[in-house]
Image (tube, rainbow, N blue to C red):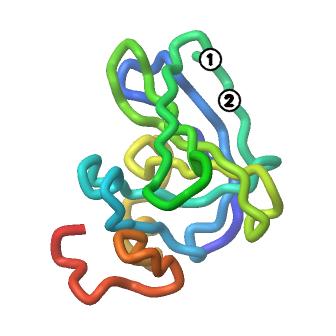
Amino acid sequence: MTYRRYHGSCHCQAVRYEAGFDLSDGTNRCNCSICSKARAWFLFVRGDAFQLLAGEEHLGSYRWQPPGQAEPFLDYRFCLRCGIRVFATGEWDRMGGRFYALHVPTVDDVDREELVNAPLNFIDNAHDRPDRAPADTRLM
């Protein structure tokens, strides 16, 4: 797999984006309370590799502050017309500052076989251990 540009959108196509990433870096599933309830499946993209092409006026926002955190870490963006969560944004030194967490099912032009063969990383944020997978990943 290699780095390339992909296009994505919400269900109604009101929100559209372009982002560059390498699927060999893998996709992620987290077990924190919001990711568990939303069945989140995401991949990280550096801020300079993302471009919103259309739909800023259709985006709603939800900022969740995890327990024990001084402030919200992510700003979840969703389409106000169809309700699909498209991506989240945040600041993280490990990602070089601004980053996007794309909701994988919103990537429109990804090859399914390439996606199936990409590594799947599990993150144990439910126990504040983002550096490891949880003991049980069956429901993630």
Are the residues tagged 2 and 1 within 8 Å (C-beta)?
A: yes
Q: Is residue 11 left or right of residue 5?
A: left
Is 134 situated left or right of 47 in this image? left
In terms of depth relative to the viewer, which is nearer, 90 or 25?
A: 90
Q: Quadrant of residue 133?
A: bottom left
Q: Position of residue 74 (x, y in %)?
A: 57, 46
Residue 71 to residue 11: above or below: below
The residue type indicated by label 1 comes to: Glu
> Where residue 52 is drawn, which disc sits there?
2
Q: Could you say which disc has been placed on residue 21 in the image?
A: none
Looking at the image, is mark 2 or mark 1 nearer the viewer?
A: 1
Residue positioned 72% across, 43% down in the render: 50
Secondary element at image label 2: strand
> Relative to 7, is 45 above or below?
below
Residue 120 in percent (x, y) is at 41, 76
Q: Quadrant of the N terminus?
A: bottom right
Compared to residue 18, the image places residue 83 above or below, namely above
| Residue 78 placement (x, y as % from top left) | 45, 28
Check the image and report above or below for 93 versus 119.
above
Q: What residue did someone put label 1 on?
A: 56
**Three-letter code for the amino acid on which mark 2 is drawn:** Leu
Label 1 element class: helix
* Depth order, front residue of 105/33: 33
- Residue drawn at (37%, 76%), measured in percent from left and top? 127
Q: Quadrant of the C terminus?
A: bottom left
Q: What residue is drawn where x is 17% and y is 77%? A: 138
Residue 34 location, x and y as percent?
Answer: 34, 50
Question: How packed is label 2: few (under 14 Cα within 10 Å), some, or many (20 or more)?
Answer: some
Q: Going 78% across and 65% down the picture, which residue do you hit?
A: 93
Identify the residue at the far left of this view: 139
Q: How many marks?
A: 2
Q: Is residue 117 visible?
A: no
